[in-house]
Amino acid sequence: MSYSVKEMFYTLQGEGTHAGRPAVFCRFAGCNLWSGREADRAQAVCQFCDTEFVGTDGLGGGKFSTAADLAARIAAFWPTGADSAQERRFVVLTGGEPLLQVDPALIEALHAQGFMVAVETNGTIAAPAGLDWICVSPKAGSTLVQKSGHELKVVVPQAGFGPSELKVLEALDFAQCRVQALDSADAHARRVAMDWAVQWCLDNPRWMLSVQTHKSLGIR
């Protein structure tokens, strides 16, 4: 199959278990929960996305006809001379919704390039075999298909994901459960969301707080 990629860039992972780890981010174009058009946001299943994933015109973006071509392009973002034998290369496949496109051929090609392969998904599509790290961020109103993985990350508050729903998610087969405060341009709303997330973790120690450190650091 061919692959449509919005952008690629080399940075530090900003959140979750791998926060602070150097990584190549590969952002796939397209999502199944929102078109990416502002005119459609109010009717979308996911209404709070802050990511640009429409088209293939970003840095490193484009259409790739084979898994090997895309894996080679991702590898080109890893710093020249870095010793991947000592610390395995790390790539984060994100979107949009990456599992609309990620397949076993791409995972195999990335492994051949020496990468540990992580995916950040909304969980509405079953993950293919071979992924090294699966982070699922479910969205209220969607059907959760991928019910296991390494990291569950729930953005709060979300209408439809209150305490009882979070307790149901807690029982799924994830190594880690995290809540992440909904970002907002409104400082008061941002503070309210963070206070809720912090208190939830304090009251429910199975959960940990996910913090978007890349935003506070001013990096991508």
Image (cartoon, rainbow, N blue to C red):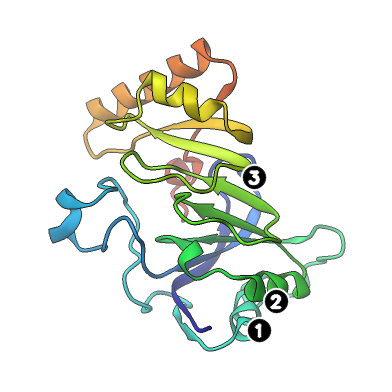
Mark 2 nearby-residue class (10 Å; few <14, some 14–19, many ≥20): some
Q: Residue at x 64, y 45 (%)?
A: 18
Mark seen at residue 18: 3
Determine the residue located farthest toward the bottom in the rendered image.
65
As measured in the structure, the alpha-carbon distance from the residue carrying label 1 to the one carrying label 3 is: 26 Å
Q: Which mark is residue 107?
A: none
Asked if residue 17 lies left or right of residue 2, the reply is: right
- The location of residue 196, given as percent across then percent down, is 37, 19
Going from N to C along the chain, the mark reached first, 3 or 2, is 3
Dot 1, crowdedness within 10 Å: few (<14), some or many (≥20)?
A: some
Which residue corresponds to mark 2?
109
- Disc 3 residue type (three-letter): His
Label whose residue precedes the other's in the sequence (1 or 3): 3
Q: Check contact, mark 2 vs mark 1: CB within 8 A.
A: yes
Asked whether the beta carbons under mark 1 and mark 3 sit within 8 Å of each other, the answer is no
Q: Which label was assigned to residue 68?
A: 1
| 193 up-or-down from 84: above or below | above
**Which marked residue is nearer to the observer: mark 3 or mark 2?**
2
Q: Amino acid at mark 2?
A: Ala
Question: What residue is at 49 percent from the left and 35 percent from the top?
Answer: 211
Which is nearer the eye, 130 or 61?
130
> Judging from the image, what secondary structure is the residue with disc 1 in?
helix
Where's residue 218, x and y in %? Answer: 43, 49
Does dot 2 land on a helix, a strand or a loop?
helix
Q: Hey, what amino acid is under mark 1?
A: Ala
Viewer-side residue, 180 vs 187: 180
Which of 197 and 11 lies nearest the eye of the viewer?
Answer: 197
Distance Cα–Cα, label 3 vs label 2:
22 Å
Looking at this rendering, what residue extends furthest in the left direction? 39
SS category of the residue bearing label 3: loop
Q: What separation in Å lies between label 2 and label 1 (alpha carbons)?
A: 6 Å
